[in-house]
Image: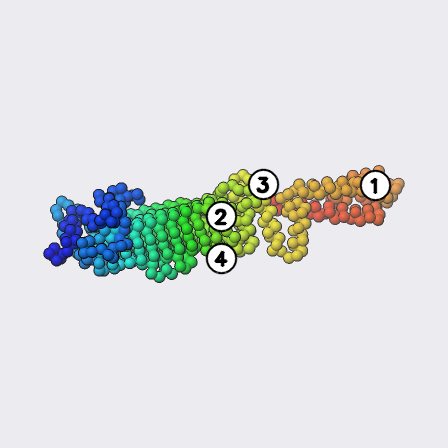
Amino acid sequence: MEINHLTPAERRVWRAFPRGETVDFRTAGDGSAGGADGTGGADGTEGEGGTGGEGGAAWGPERTLRASVVKALLISGPQVEGEVPALRVCGARVTGPLDLTHAVIDTPVRLSHCHFTDPPEFYGAQLRRLSLRGSSLPALDLGSVRIEGVLQLSECRMRGRIQLAGAQIAGALFLARAELTTRDPTKAAIRLDGATVGEDIWAPGVRATGEIRLNGATVNGSVNLSDARLDPAEGLALDAQKATVEGDMLLKRARIRGWIGLRGARVTGRLDLSYVDLAKPGAAVLRANNATVGQLWLRKGPPVDGRISLRHTQIDVLFLEPEKVPGTVYLESLVYTSLIPNEPAARRLPLVERDGDGYVPYAYEQLTAAYRRNGDEDSARRVQLAKQRRHRTTLAWYGRAWGHVQDAAVGYGFRPLRACGWLLSLLVIGTVAFTVHRPRPLKPAEAPEFDPFFYTLDLLLPVISFGQEPAFAPDGAFQKLSYVLVLAGWILASTVIAGVTRVVNRQ
């Protein structure tokens, strides 16, 4: 392209390109143009102050660049010996389609705070570095792109989808405070399916009305969505099925009006949902089945409004405050090594009693194991007792009746002192009753001296005999009392044996 065919604005960019100089078209009405030297950014990138290109539709020819000129610069722009060429433009209006499909671009590209009339096409392109920070775009296609450095999209205003499926980004992906509003809010606002990011996805404060999709993506750093606002038209807000995050996944203080899908995902570090406002009434808001998570933090902030599903998930540290637990959870085959903070069993039991699958014995066993690892044996017994009571509701009427007897007598073996209390009470009743009314001896000449205390013990203890019970025979109401004491003794002995057997088998 001949320089004579360029507009004054394009000529400025053409002349600056060989030396990598910045051309800043912004005016006082756009805000500060600071950061032209490429330093001082809060997120570790170049500092570029001022507003974005949202009002760029009204910009005149003095700050307008044709997309064909930008393409010509990037493909075959002029070079100066001893200088490093780069495209660095701020505050321009780029008109026409910028089609760089499968292009190989050896120079850094920065088109920050610009306004694009047409969606740029970078599908399959190879770039050293790309920054569109603060720009306004109809959409952006970066599918299968390869970027040697970082991809900077912070503070962008997107009116269509960002396509990054299959992209390979050696550095970080920045989306801090970006606003992603798709034309069709039922579809993804940004697609990173199968993408590979060498460092972090840094997107605190991002706003999206469509889905953020990370299916099968690999992030070698962390994913930061703290303070995000995700409000999709359909139910899915963040879809990261089978994604791999080697660092943390942070959603602190995020406001999400949809559900998070993490089925089969692996988060090596912390999945942090502290202070999150997560709501999708009547639906599952967190679906992390078959996932592997280093730490899951669900703490502070309003209670979760919806259902949580953690079936077949493995978690090393579960940091869960009881106040955050929703009305329905799914915990079948959930495995966690540590549960913090160490709350009393009464505050933890709703976690397993609200299981949408009904009675799930494994959930009680996991909670019991967590208490035992903390050395809290009393809370572990309380959980086991609650398990037996919940199991009782699944039995036939006769099983429930026998369960009530075991519960009242010895607390299913977890309250053995109850049996002592029952025995002492019955022993006092029998001793007093048979002191007042001594039973007649069956063989007066051979009968031992009557002792009401040991006579009552003979009735209560089904195995031990003191020789009192076979030698005397009460009558009337006292005969019926003796039957009650014998029956009570057998029941207490059976429940104690059943409880002891259950404890021994568990250990």
Residue at the image point whose x is 20% and y is 48% from the top? 24
Label 2 sits on a secondary structure element that is helix
First in sequence, mark 4 or 1: give its number. Answer: 4
Residue at the image point whose x is 83% and y is 46% from the top? 474
Q: Is residue 387 left or right of residue 433?
A: left
The spot of residue 44 in percent (x, y) is: 29, 43
Query: Callout 4, which amino acid?
Result: Gly
Which label was assigned to residue 378? 3
Q: Is residue 96 left or right of residue 233?
A: left
- Residue at mark 4: 282
First in sequence, mark 4 or 2: give its number. Answer: 4
Question: Which of label 1 and label 2 is nearer to you?
Answer: 2
Query: Callout 3, which amino acid?
Result: Asp
Can the viewer see residue 4 in this picture? yes
- Give the crowd class for mark 2: few <14, some 14-19, many >=20 residues within 10 Å: some
The spot of residue 293 in percent (x, y) is: 43, 48
- Residue at mark 1: 436
Query: Callout 1, which amino acid?
Result: Val
First in sequence, mark 3 or 2: give its number. Answer: 2
- Give the crowd class for mark 3: few <14, some 14-19, many >=20 residues within 10 Å: some
First in sequence, mark 4 or 3: give its number. Answer: 4
- Residue at mark 2: 324
The spot of residue 450 in percent (x, y) is: 83, 39
CB under 8 Å between discs 1 and 3: no
User: As rendered, which of 233 and 170 lies closer to the eye?
Assistant: 233
CB under 8 Å between discs 1 and 2: no
Q: CA distance from mark 4 to mark 2?
A: 16 Å
